[in-house]
Amino acid sequence: MSKVTLTINGKQVTVPAGTSVLDAAREAGFFIPTLCHDPANPGFGACRLCVVEIKGARNMPASCVTEATNGMVVETESPAVMQARRTIIELLLANHPTECLTCDKNGDCRLQDYAYRYDVRQASFEGEKHDYPLEDSNPYIIRNMNKCVLCGKCVRTCAQVEDRQVIDFTFRGFQTKVAPAMNTDLAGSDCVYCGRCVAVCPVGALLYKPMAGKARTWELTKKQTTCTFCDAGCQFDLNYKDGKVIGITANTPGEGRPLCLKGRLGLELLYVDKPLTPMLKKDGEFVEVTWAEVLGLESVFEKLKAQETQK
Amino acid sequence: MNNLNEIRAKYTEQFQQKSKRARIVVGLGTCGIAAGGDKVMEAIKQEVAARNLDIDIDFTSCIGMCYREPIVEVALPGMASVIYGDIFPDKVSQLIESHVVNKQPVTEWAAMQIPEGRTEYDGIVTMDKSAYYEKQVRTVTSRLGRTNPESIEDYIATGGYEAIEKALSMDRLAVIDEVKKSGLRGRGGAGFSTGMKWTFVYNAQGDKKYAVCNADEGDPGAFMDRSVLEGDPHGVIEGMMIGGYAIGADEGYIYCRAEYPLAIRRLNLAIAKAEKLGLLGENILGSGFNFRIRIKAGAGAFVCGEETALLNSIEGQRGMPRVRPPFPANKGLWQKPTTLNNVETYANVPFILRKGADWYAGMGTEKSKGSKVFCLTGKINNTGLAEVPMGITLREVIFNIAGGIQDGKQFKAVQSGGPSGGCLPAEKLDLPIDYESLGAVGAIMGSGGLVVMDENTCMVDVARFFLNFTQNESCGKCIPCREGTKRMLEILTRICDGEGKVEDMDTLERLANVIKTASLCGLGQTCPNPILTTLRYFRHEYEAHIIDKRCPAGVCNALLVYKIIAENCTGCGACRRVCPVGAISGENKQPHTLDTAACIKCGGCVSKCKFDAIIRG
């Protein structure tokens, strides 16, 4: 594979042709912030936090969508870049609730990280903030659109799920919002709560409801595990607090990894000593049934029983 | 059919026959219809029927003098065509009586006459000598107001589809070379060389290529593309065919905003007629070249005028810009190599092929060749469409063609290029109009909108107006544009409301610079221009608002105080009677007083007072 050599912050860097400036810089050990960049889903270039100065370029290009070329001269933290990044962070904070103290993402939030790194304490713009109602009308995902930075990672992730594409951008300008069709809530949409959107959200706009309010991020110990419900072998992090698993964090979904609801909710059974009697809806009423019936294994059970009696 | 010789001879004969008969032609572009042109047409038909006259009645599109609509042309055999302006139905009877029956043109209603080799009338200015047209050239607009836009016969009779015939006999690269040599640059605003763009698409690998026409004209006050589409739809189609042939495309899309129903109707009609003659479809003129054109009606998002958002919209996706590179030349519509050109760009191409690159390059300046169509709007006397050679000065356009400022007021600024352009002050009036000169002073050529403002315009308010537009039209994808325009708009609104702070000017400048350099697409990169140019050329107005709490132009209501000057007041009571909140009191024939606390600043009293006794400031 052919290679290209460029200069980043005065350092010569050689990378395979086709590498983005962002990856080249990160590989060389330089920090570049990103909100909308998703390595599994690249090419969106919306948040503009990763802008850099490239000698000869008309404007400041986003490094995540700019291909490194031979002889390119890149500055990742020049005064102009710093001013742009600070201003962008300020603009986000100007339209973001200042409730970090009680936010579940506190300690694991990109916006917080970048505000800290670039020393943006508060926005110097006073003005309108969004005031959307909190959406928690479903049992799995809490959507707080006031915290959304519109990075679009959830939209692109959802679009990759077969048969879904539940959410997209709606409205224009300041009113732009991520929502299901007709601006309903998730409960009124085709969402199956696979939770992939939650896994990629860089801020506290999307939360996994079973874990919400249970722990601060730094109280958790994570242990990676592989789900055994099916052959896909998805990787999950088990989140322990005081030695007890309180929830699962799905790792970033990749190709052939469904990260399904089943694997995620299977956890609920972890602390159940005796499984509850299963219920089935019959003539509009839930009635207690046997496990054999609910799993559709009645005939197998009968054959097993027949085998046993034959012995 | 391998060539058009036979039908061209036939249609040319038909076209010439037209001028041998008496005829009345009504301007039925959108501007003409809006002014009542269709009612005038109805009145003419009735009048002609009632008088049982042997006269042809036809229609055309906007000739450019929108300020004189409804426009009616009357031509008698052998005599010059007389173009009448402001012909409303009540004037029709007298017009026909005098000009058609008595053969006496109504000189005082005539805007001009067009001799075209026929006998001239006395006392009516000819088109090439008229103030409005003297400094104009008519290339792209040459058929506007002169032919029936719904007639392919008229088009072919006036040289139409000659250029595609010529192109098809040439090598594809030779066609591109000709366009390159002409110096034609994108008329949508950015000014990229059309020939270069076509070379990129020609060189791009792909089994399928597209030629797309950007007819999503969205700037407030711009109507060049609409006028060209309504007046010469075949010209745009022929330009697209030539482009399609040159780059190797067999399919074209015209992305036209749905707010242009007449343009879409005439385009559809033109496409159907061209298909019927075999000019669109398979094996065009026996050359083996296939080309079809579809129309995609856009739903009216300004951002869809940005090329990648436009492509997304055609594909049925949300109109949001994509990152470039890859450029549409390599990965455009459905990821296939695509050329995207503006209506006016395509409309220029047939003329370049027919008359030659050298002829075209003979017009204009060193780097900006040819002519450009402008829409003259705002506080000027002559609102309309004007095609001028590149390099003409803003002063010539505004004071010669547009007839100067309304009501003898002072010129203050001209906004070139719509919401993405800049406001230029009187010192810049002698600037030649070309891509580089306008760019150098912070404005842009844009698609060709020129909004002229007079002394009664507040420049802070103008910046606020354009920011409101761009904020509403931002697609919301990138943060600087979405959030930044919102904050700039809030700051400008605050300044207009008299609550501005001194540091607001620095904040505006910082935001503007970041948005300009860090935004994803052209909308974000240019939307700060109105702010940057007003801050640059009209800073004193910002300072007056912020520091002195005063709006020098008398526009920003929150900063205005109404006062009655006792010496001037005759006590007529007109203001007292019109005041909706009873803020004015006084005895008849005694100077009145105005209660500023009760005043709602509606301005009713000022417009009623005949003695200049009420001032606001």
Image: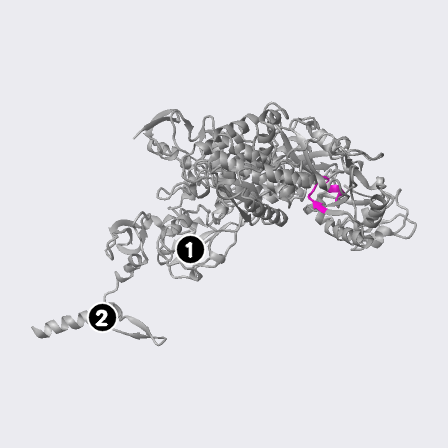
Say which of B335 and B430 sits in front. B335
Instruction: Say which residue appears at 40% left-offset and 39% top-offset.
Output: B207
* Mark drawn on residue B242: none
Answer yes or no: is residue A217 visible.
Answer: yes
Note whether B210 is above or below A279 in the view shown.
Answer: above
Q: Amino acid at mark 2?
A: Ala
Residue A243 sits inside the magenta stretch? no
For disc 2, the chain is A
Distance of label 1 from label 2 (alpha carbons): 35 Å
Residue range corresponding to the magenta coloring: B58-69
Total number of numbered discs in the rendering: 2
> Percent x, y for residue A87?
50, 38
> Percent x, y for residue A92?
49, 44
A273 left or right of B485 in image:
left
Is label 1 in a helix, a strand or a loop? loop
For disc 1, the chain is A
Please name the residue that numbered disc 1 is placed on. A166
